[in-house]
Image (cartoon, rainbow, N blue to C red):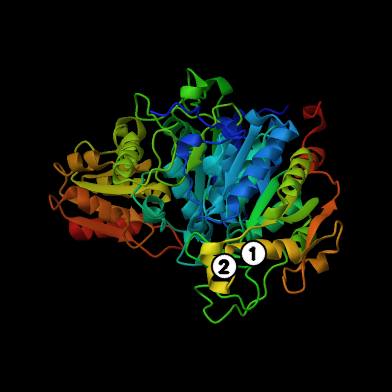
Amino acid sequence: MKPAVLSGVHFITGDVACAEGALAAGCRFFGAYPITPATEIAEHIAGRLPEVGGTFIQMEDEIAAIASILGASSAGVKSMTATSGPGFSLMMENIGLAACTEIPCVIVNVQRAGPSTGLPTQGAQGDMMQARWGSHGDYKIIALAPISPQEIFYQTILAFNLSETYRVPVLIMTDEIIGHLSERVVIPDKSEIKLASRPRPKGRKDRFLPYEPGPNGVAPMAIAGKGYNIHVTGLTHNEKGYPDMTVECQKKMMARLTGKIQNNLDDIIKTEGYMLDDAEIIIISYGVSARTCHTAVDELRSQGIKAGLFRLITVWPFPEDQICQLAKQAKAFITVEINLGQIHLEVERCVKNKAPTYLVGHVGGTIITPERVIETIKEVS
Amino acid sequence: MSHQKKAVHPLDDLIRTDRLPHIWCPGCGIGTVFSSTLIAMKESGIDLTKTVMVSGIGCSGRGAGYINLDSFHTTHGRAIPFATGLKLANPELNVIVFSGDGDIFAIGGNHFIHAARRNVDLTIICVNNLNYGMTGGQVAATTPYNAKTTTTPTGNPERPFNLPMLSYASGATYISRWTILHARNISDSIQEALLKRGFSFIEVLAPCPVNYGRRNKEKPFDTLKLYQENTIIKNKAHPFELDIDFERGVVLGKFLDINRPTWTDMYNKTCRPKDLLE
């Protein structure tokens, strides 16, 4: 059998690094549907999965792609799909099913400019709110935003680990620019990669309650074919997994679904600070946009302006506490993202008028240059 | 306190009796299809621990909620791709899709034809009650010409699907059609399908007196009479003969039972390195 972890130094695109990250994370099922600019993930993993004992299938549409990974994950196999805007929209209903039934899965969105067919070959970060709220009802997911092909490799492993640990869909919200960017990617030795698996039930099978939460709020998961006779439904369900159309049951289920994320924020949220200690102007950014912000911070510092960067590695759940904390020291916040202001709204919400907040954003298709960030900061400072 | 011995039904071990009473209306045909399915599962001798039922949404889609095995009640129309993922990820599982005509053939029609084309080893049981029952009786992709439903108050202007012909054209390897009056035949067909490696399709005509019959001057007993008097069993009938028209007569039977490699067979042969197969 060929190795699943291709340890060594590679020069590969973000899309390929994502596929290799999935294999290193133990992903052994991929339900695909081609869409620019995510297709290369499917193309790469289509060749790799069968040689490591996994299974690849190109389904008939994105709805089938995500439904298939939920089925495969229910059979106990770590599963993933990858798409872009239009496909992401089609996947929304089943993201809700995964959230409600707590089936672990990883969904990659290589974002392109929308709305509708938009600019298929050009990057954007316009699906960030859709990632959070796209399926109907209240629910919580985890979303990550990688800054480079190297980071997408690690974030894909992290995505699987979080998905398994919390039994929640994890979205990797990358973009066309990172997806198609070739860079040096170092894949470590297999022994250096830590993997998490969903909690497994213990004790008597006939007394097992599929939705009775464990200590961290996450219920152990029985997989199909092991004799637990589980029932899984997208209807509001009780701890037994049975439909229960009462307000009390809805309340209890929703408390569990949101609580398992909300009560584990310290474990889930990852952020990175750059020159933040004495920063008066704080840039908030993520994904490809954060790359250009690094350059902007260096340039502003060389001109004596105390700028710093707060980078979201985890975008959802949103690092509210960290930003509230930063609001005590900052004179201004600048959110940099390739959209007309999505995460910007979250920053505004957390800063709560303690400092002015500005957006450097545009409608998508190109990156935001460091010059634009510098220009805006000079105007406001 | 009653001293009567608690009645035990021979299928109780396969039913989540703690979920009774079920939601199906008086006169509904789904229960007959469901019990015929359970009988077939028992009689087939398959390992029930490794048997999974997947449903979509709708009246028949509640089937998965009543079987006392691993069962998945998924989203509307998506039972088949969900089932495909289960089967491909663990080929040892016996995967049954139990759902209705609206779920499998309208919103989920695309998934049906592709799973049949791929010959995924699934057993698809479609309860065809000619309308959307759960939502109160709207026109479906199977509603006959001129039939009245809440969304076709003056009659259905559209042509219904011929489901066995659609299955045949899509690549199914086992196709049969019965009505709920043919409970024994349903069980036999499902048993054959469960033991067969390949994509199997069983259509069962079932009455929906509350929502369909009521609007089409068909009393519950009239529908059963139609099933008895206006049907003919013709095994291996040509798919062209299988339109549902009770005035001309509806053809029932086992229409197809052939073998071709399943998706997993072909994937292993075509995509898997040889050393991994030994």
Label 2: chain letter: B
Viewed as shown, does residue B198 lie left or right of A132? right
Q: Which residue is mark 1?
A: B223
> Which quadrant of the structure image shows residue A147?
top left
Question: Is residue A15 shown to the viewer in this render?
Answer: no
The residue depicted at 46 percent of the width and 33 percent of the height is A158
Q: Split into 4 quadrants, where in the image is the C terminus of chain A?
A: bottom left
Quadrant location of the N terminus of chain A? top right
* Left or right, residue B204 beside residue A175: right
Secondary structure state at the residue bearing disc 1? helix
Three-letter amino acid code at disc 2? Gly
The picture places residue A167, in percent across and down from the top left corner, at 44, 35
Q: Tell me the distance, in whole angstroms, between the alpha carbons under discs 2 and 1.
A: 8 Å
Q: Position of residue B224 (x, y in %)?
A: 66, 61
Check disc 2 and report its element: helix, strand or loop: helix
> Which residue is the site of mark 2?
B213
Disc 1 marks a residue whose amino acid type is: Thr
In terms of depth relative to the viewer, which is nearer, A146 or B63?
A: B63
Residue at horizontal 65 percent and vertical 39 percent from the top = B38
Q: Are dots 2 and 1 in contact, CB under 8 Å? A: yes
Q: Chain of mark 1?
A: B
**In the current view of this chain or complex, which residue is farthest to the top?**
A203
Left or right position of B151 against B189: left
